[in-house]
Every structure is written in C-alpha cells, then in structure tokens.
Amino acid sequence: VKPNNASNQDSTIPAARGGPWRFRSGKTENPFRSSTRQVFLENLSNDDDAHIIDRTSMFGGLFKISRRYGVYGLTRTSIDLDLMNSESKFIGMPVNRKDRDDFLGTKYGSPLEIQVLYLDSDLCVCTTGQGLDGPVHVYTK
C-alpha cells in the first residue's frame, strides 16, 4: 500500500492472507458455504425469550438454512439450547419448515450444549455443540 500522498492510480491493495476463507465475529465465509450466528440474550421485548439463530448459506445463497434455538440454561461455562424451528429455502422459496413438535424423537430433539472455553470482555471462544472434537466459534467485540 502506498503512502497517503501517492496518487490513487498507483495504489495497490494487499492480497488477503489465509486464502478465500474469512472469519469474523459470529461469521464464517468461503466460496461454497457461509454461516452466521446471532445471539439474543438481553434487551429483548416482553414477548420474546432468549434465543440463538444460526443461518447457513450455500453456493452463493442458492440454498439457505435457518435454525432458531431457545436458550433454556445459561451459566458462566455453558449455554443449553433447544431447537425451536428450522427452515430451508432454495432460490428464496421455502422448501422445508419444521417446528419443535417435528423434532421430538429425533436427534434434533435432544438438547444442545455449547461450552464456553474462554471468556473475557473482548473475546469469547465456544464449541459449536459438537463438543471438544468439533470446530469452535470465536467472537470478538
């Protein structure tokens, strides 16, 4: 990158490090799949409970999955979740929608525990619900 007094014609942008994958707060992106996680624990309206929404987009948004988890347990070291509903869309049109009653008796009907591995005022490292053998999410302020 050239200094500020250089002409705009000659300025170059440095190449991205780490390839096409970018990791942001609650967000993972790559050319084929991207995901976001929104956490709603406080400052909620009177008719809304604490919840987490996971959204996954594949192939540039052609196929999307949205899952809403209700928070039923919260401690310093873990968040206990229950899958409330799931919706799949293909080219923006709903393909599949399931609610809490549809998950009973399936692997999705069992509670999900997210473990908090590290937490301070600027950084949080959590498991994704697959325990210590699965990937982790890193959140920054």
Image (cartoon, rainbow, N blue to C red):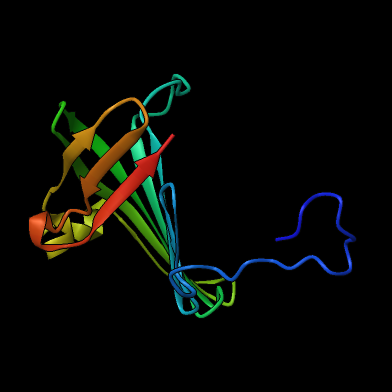
In the rendered image, the quadrant that contains the C terminus is: top left
Q: Is residue 80 above or below residue 14?
A: above
Q: Residue at x 79, y 65 (%)?
A: 11
Position of residue 140 in the picture relative to residue 7 (left or right) = left
Q: Residue at x 46, y 79 (%)?
A: 32
Q: What is the x, y in percent for residue 18?
A: 43, 70
The residue that appears at 55% across and 73% down in the rendered structure is: 61
Nearest the viewer among 69 and 26 is: 26
Question: How many numbered tags mark residues here?
Answer: 0
**Is 28 rendered above or below residue 62?**
above
Of residues 128 and 48, the one drawn nearer to the viewer in this rendering: 128
Above-or-below relation of 91 to 23: below
Q: In the rendering, at what x and y percent does residue 12 appear?
A: 74, 68
Which quarter of the rendered picture does the N terminus lie within?
Answer: bottom right
Q: Residue 7: x, y in percent?
A: 90, 60
Camera sees residue 95: no
Left or right of 118, for residue 62: right
Nearer the observer, 19 or 75: 19
Quarter of image, res 67: bottom left
Q: Is residue 1 left or right of residue 140?
A: right
Residue 136 can be seen in this image: yes
Say which residue appears at 15% left-offset and 55% top-offset. 109
Question: Where does the image place residue 102, in percent across and percent down from the top left?
Answer: 24, 60
Q: Residue 122 or 34: which is nearer the viewer?
A: 122
